[in-house]
Amino acid sequence: MIYWDIFLAFFIPGIVGYGGGPATIPLIQEEVVNRYGWYSVSEFGELLAIGNALPGPIATKMAGYIGYEIGGFFGAFVALFATVAPSLIAMVFLLGLLYRFKDSPKVKKMTALIRPTIGILLGVLALQFFVTSWEAAGWLQTTFLIIISFLLLEKWKTHPAFVIAGALLYGAIFLGQTPIG
């Protein structure tokens, strides 16, 4: 039964997560934190930070790790397959249909309406992580990390992976928090 739960936890976000990995993260969080209770918001946030620091698609990295944690090697396989299965199905069965209607005004309008929804989901996820950080590290540490991250990303155009790695290192040294493990 656990493998079926793992499959559903990653297959459903893969189907409804229009927009790739970043768009599926709030949906994966809903499944693994709220629905199944495998992780807390804080643990999920740490896992997301670590996953973002590594190369490759975020959804598959998270699926592999969570699947392994919950169901061992076969759980990782099931989670990875469930993550890529919706795209695989869409590519095999719907590619011709999508190509046929790619210039349709209705399809373009539908796509334009989906984008704000993804933005709101990502905003809610960011707010939850902010609240968790505020509660765990305090307002001074959280504000400091926000300002430094903003400057590194926007003013000095530092690659996001370096900012994430730096924040992880800062947390390990100054906040005494260790990543999931």
Image (cartoon, grey):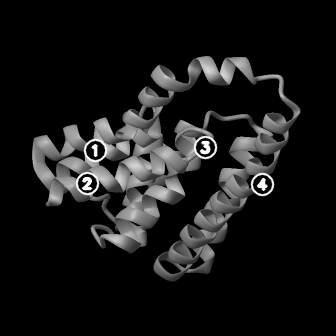
Residue picked out by circle 2: 6
Mark 4 or mark 1: whose residue is earlier in sequence: 1
Determine the secondary structure under disc 1: helix
Give the quadrant of residue 146: bottom right
Q: Nearer the viewer, residue 5 or 125?
A: 5
Judge the density around disc 2: few (<14), some (14-19), many (≥20) Cα neighbours within 10 Å: many
Q: Is residue 43 above or below residue 61?
A: below
Residue 157 coordinates in the image, percent (x, y): 73, 34
Mark 1 or mark 3: whose residue is earlier in sequence: 3
Mark 3 or mark 4: whose residue is earlier in sequence: 3
**Real-space Cα distance between discs 1 and 2?**
6 Å
Q: Are marks 1 and 2 in contact (CB under 8 Å)?
A: yes
Determine the secondary structure under disc 3: loop
Q: Is residue 142 above or below residue 59?
A: below
Q: Is residue 101 above or below residue 64?
A: above
Q: Which mark is residue 1?
A: none
Q: Nearer the viewer, residue 155 or 24?
A: 24
Q: Residue at x 31, y 68 (%)?
A: 39
* Quadrant into which the C terminus falls: bottom left
* Quadrant into which the N terminus falls: bottom left
Residue picked out by circle 4: 116
**Real-space Cα distance between discs 4 and 2?**
28 Å
Judge the density around disc 4: few (<14), some (14-19), many (≥20) Cα neighbours within 10 Å: few
Q: Residue at x 62, y 40 (%)?
A: 19
Q: Nearer the viewer, residue 20 or 170?
A: 20
Disc 2 marks a residue whose amino acid type is Ile
Q: Which mark is residue 79?
A: 1
Residue picked out by circle 3: 18
- Left or right: residue 103 versus residue 87 is right
Residue 83 coordinates in the image, percent (x, y): 38, 40
Judge the density around disc 3: few (<14), some (14-19), many (≥20) Cα neighbours within 10 Å: some
